[in-house]
């Protein structure tokens, strides 16, 4: 292989071996996340350069075996079988549990591929005063064995060097090595692994990490304390989301106000000025402001996963969820839904029971995702100031936690109803490996925050800009000569110049194409306390829930001659055109909040549900039952608080 060629590397390993840490250490920020062709399994790819050679890295889903019992394992096996003979397979193993990890290694070797074994978590082995004879293990396995601590970036250069030197081996030699099986049957494989590990590992010390984990588990998985600790963590997270993010959010908000004002004055008056300021910047500002909250949420989720606590939540919640037609593995998709329902629904593939998997998919979108945070934040701010507290706690944070808990309650109650409706004779099983507790990998946390915020901004940003431009066009033009008639109407008036401009802008917005669309649907949503502007936002939110804020920002920017106010200030000062009273009353705002808790407003989620269930029936049922729940709940809330 010439130096100019690109080398392909494939990472595979059991769950909880630190494979993702090695992937992050090798590729840094040069990563992409997509799907394997034809399936919704995540495909992580990245690249790096070593000795002037480009190296492409593919991170396969965590798997225990190449005898597939799940879609993840099937994808891993299929991908490995179709790799080129020049590709190098890196098997990542937990050094503290080598015997179990070598089972997968032996299956990979049997495929006849070029293999490197990376022993991760060597620091834990050393803490237990245990040692692995690397040279002896390498000789017995007939492949390079590289010890690393991926969390601390130790040994990463050695992995890169091993890959580089491995490329220089003659292919005939490699084929001769890999074509001869040490291992023909499952029992022989296990016996050989036992012999190898006994010969290469010294086990003088105690496994202190596992002893510590056991002590902590006695508390966090306790049938009483465990649930209290979990609720306390959720409470802390939502308090932090509002308290810690308030200052950077204010800076971003004020920055966009100044930017809009600057651009408005710098550009000549006209269509282009109006499009950029009231269309693009207004819509974009409505989403960028929530980056601090999204970053904090993903930071906490990554930390909980990194430390191993999420597995304990699965074990803990299995006791409750089984009564509602789910099992402990359902909690991972449910908790993941607090970030996004799409990967959460794909994560339900680990649930072997079809009925429980289907129910998990159907109720996961009821859990409030990160896309709802911008909606919750802007609406709660209209009725509760950021300084209001309940005792020592931030009241806005308490309300958001209440909305999340409401979504969780709705999800398990919906699951219980589906349990009674959906029939299945398949038995339910729940097996879960508990990883040891470890300190979070802060670099990995940083990568995850950067990656998720980037996806949030660019994926949602593209949709928001596109919708903002369309909305601006719909708001800026009207059929016939309606705008000219409005100008004539206010040609002679007793109002001041600023008041006249505001009235003209408001009347033109109602007369525009957007106003016509909104007014047409207004009778259906008026019982919920919503006006036509809210109606338009509900429609655009089907593209993505967070589009609500961008839509409102565009509507209120086009409909207001004053470009020096933030979207929150404009919504707080909005009036009901019929009564002249404040539009966003407590009743209307709570009604809208409840609607967004329950409504199925994400086309991407529906597409994933269709692909996962291979049926259009289930996405349709999802839209209908969640839409009905949202409408009736909003109607009830508005009636009570009016």
Image (cartoon, rainbow, N blue to C red):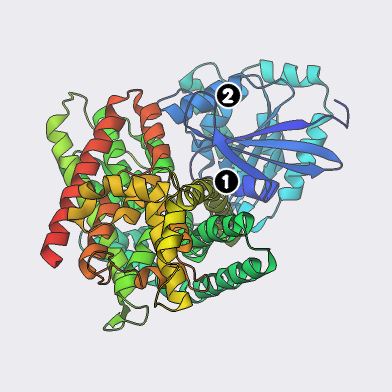
Q: Quadrant of the C terminus?
A: bottom left
Question: At 71% from the left edge and 36% from the top edge, which residue is drawn?
Answer: 56
Rendering coords of residue 142 (x, y %): 70, 29
Which residue is rendered at x = 19% and y = 46% of the image? 629
Image x and y of residue 391, in percent: 26, 84
Using a 10 Å C-alpha cutoff, classify the residue at mark 1 as few (fewer than 14 neighbours), some (14 to 19) or many (20 or more).
Answer: many
Total number of numbered discs in the rendering: 2
Q: Taking 88 as reference, is 477 left or right?
A: left
Could you tell me which residue is drawn at 13 percent across and 56 percent down? 636
Res. 573 visible in picture: yes
Q: Which residue is mark 1?
A: 20
Residue 79 is tagged as: 2
Q: Position of residue 299 (x, y in %)?
A: 49, 61
Q: Is residue 154 left or right of residue 491?
A: right
Above or below, 533 against 292 in this view is above
Asked whether the viewer can see residue 630, the reply is: no
The N terminus lies in which quarter of the figure? Answer: top right
464 left or right, relative to 606: right
Q: Nearer the viewer, residue 222 or 583?
A: 583
Q: Is 73 above or below relative to 488?
A: above
The alpha-carbon separation of the residues under discs 2 and 1 comes to 18 Å
Residue 431 higher or lower than 632, as above or below: above
Q: Which mark is residue 613?
A: none
């Amino acid at each position: 292989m010439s130096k100019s060629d690109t080398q392909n590397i494939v990472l595979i390993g059991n769950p909880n071996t630190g494979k993702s840490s090695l992937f992050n250490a090798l590729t840094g920020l040069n990563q992409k996340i997509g799907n394997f062709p034809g399936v919704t399994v995540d495909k992580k790819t990245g690249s790096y350069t070593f000795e002037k050679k480009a190296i492409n890295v593919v991170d396969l889903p965590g798997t225990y075996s190449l005898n597939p019992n799940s879609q993840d394992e099937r994808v891993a096996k299929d991908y490995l079988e179709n790799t080129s003979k020049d590709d190098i397979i890196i098997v990542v193993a937990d050094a503290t549990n080598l015997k179990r990890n070598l089972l997968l290694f032996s299956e990979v070797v049997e495929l006849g591929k070029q293999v490197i074994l990376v022993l991760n978590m060597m620091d834990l082995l050393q803490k237990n005063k245990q040692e692995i004879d690397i040279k002896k293990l390498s000789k017995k396995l007939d492949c390079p064995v590289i010890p690393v601590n991926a969390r601390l970036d130790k040994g990463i250069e050695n992995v890169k060097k091993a890959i580089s030197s491995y490329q220089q081996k003659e292919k005939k030699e490699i084929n001769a090595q890999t074509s001869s099986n040490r291992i023909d049957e499952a029992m022989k494989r296990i016996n050989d692994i036992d012999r190898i590990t006994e010969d290469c590992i010294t086990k003088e010390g105690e496994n202190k990490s596992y002893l510590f984990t056991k002590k902590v588990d006695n508390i966090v998985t306790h049938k009483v304390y465990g649930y209290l600790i979990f609720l306390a963590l959720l409470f802390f997270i939502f308090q932090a989301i509002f308290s810690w993010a308030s200052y950077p959010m204010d800076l971003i908000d004020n920055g966009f106000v100044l930017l809009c004002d600057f651009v408005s004055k710098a550009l000549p008056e006209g269509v282009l000025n109006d499009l950029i300021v009231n269309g693009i910047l207004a819509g974009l500002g409505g989403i960028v402001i929530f980056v601090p909250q999204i970053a904090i949420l993903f930071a906490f989720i990554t930390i909980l996963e990194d430390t191993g606590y999420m597995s304990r939540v699965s074990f803990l919640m299995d006791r409750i969820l089984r009564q509602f037609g789910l099992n402990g593995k359902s909690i991972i998709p449910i908790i993941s839904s607090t970030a996004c329902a799409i990967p959460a629904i794909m994560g339900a593939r680990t649930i072997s029971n079809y009925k429980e998997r289907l129910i998990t998919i159907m109720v996961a979108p009821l859990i409030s995702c990160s896309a709802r945070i911008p909606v919750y934040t802007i609406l709660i701010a209209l009725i509760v100031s950021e300084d209001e507290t309940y005792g020592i706690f931030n009241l806005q944070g308490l309300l958001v936690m209440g909305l999340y808990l409401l979504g969780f309650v709705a999800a398990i109650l919906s699951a219980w109803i589906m349990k009674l409706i959906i029939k299945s004779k398949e038995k339910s099983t729940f097996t879960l490996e508990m990883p040891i507790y470890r300190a979070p990998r802060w670099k990995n946390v940083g990568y995850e925050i950067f990656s998720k915020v980037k996806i949030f901004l660019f994926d949602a940003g593209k949709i928001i800009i596109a919708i903002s431009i369309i909305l601006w066009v719909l708001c800026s033009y009207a059929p016939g000569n309606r705008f000219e008639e409005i100008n004539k109407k206010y040609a002679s008036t007793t109002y001041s110049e600023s008041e006249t401009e505001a009235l003209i802008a408001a009347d033109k917005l109602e007369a525009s194409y957007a106003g016509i669309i909104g007014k047409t649907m207004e009778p259906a949503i008026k019982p919920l306390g919503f006006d036509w502007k809210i109606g338009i936002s509900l429609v655009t939110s089907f593209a993505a829930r967070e589009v609500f804020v961008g839509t409102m920002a565009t509507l209120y920017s086009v409909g207001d001659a004053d470009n020096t106010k933030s979207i929150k200030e404009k919504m707080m000062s909005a009036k009901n055109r019929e009564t002249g009273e404040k539009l966003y009353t407590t009743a209307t705002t709570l009604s809208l909040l409840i609607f967004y808790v329950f409504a199925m407003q994400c086309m991407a989620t529906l597409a994933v549900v269709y692909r996962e269930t291979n049926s259009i029936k289930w996405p349709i049922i999802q839209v209908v039952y969640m839409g009905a729940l949202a409408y009736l709940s909003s109607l009830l809330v508005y009636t009570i608080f009016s």
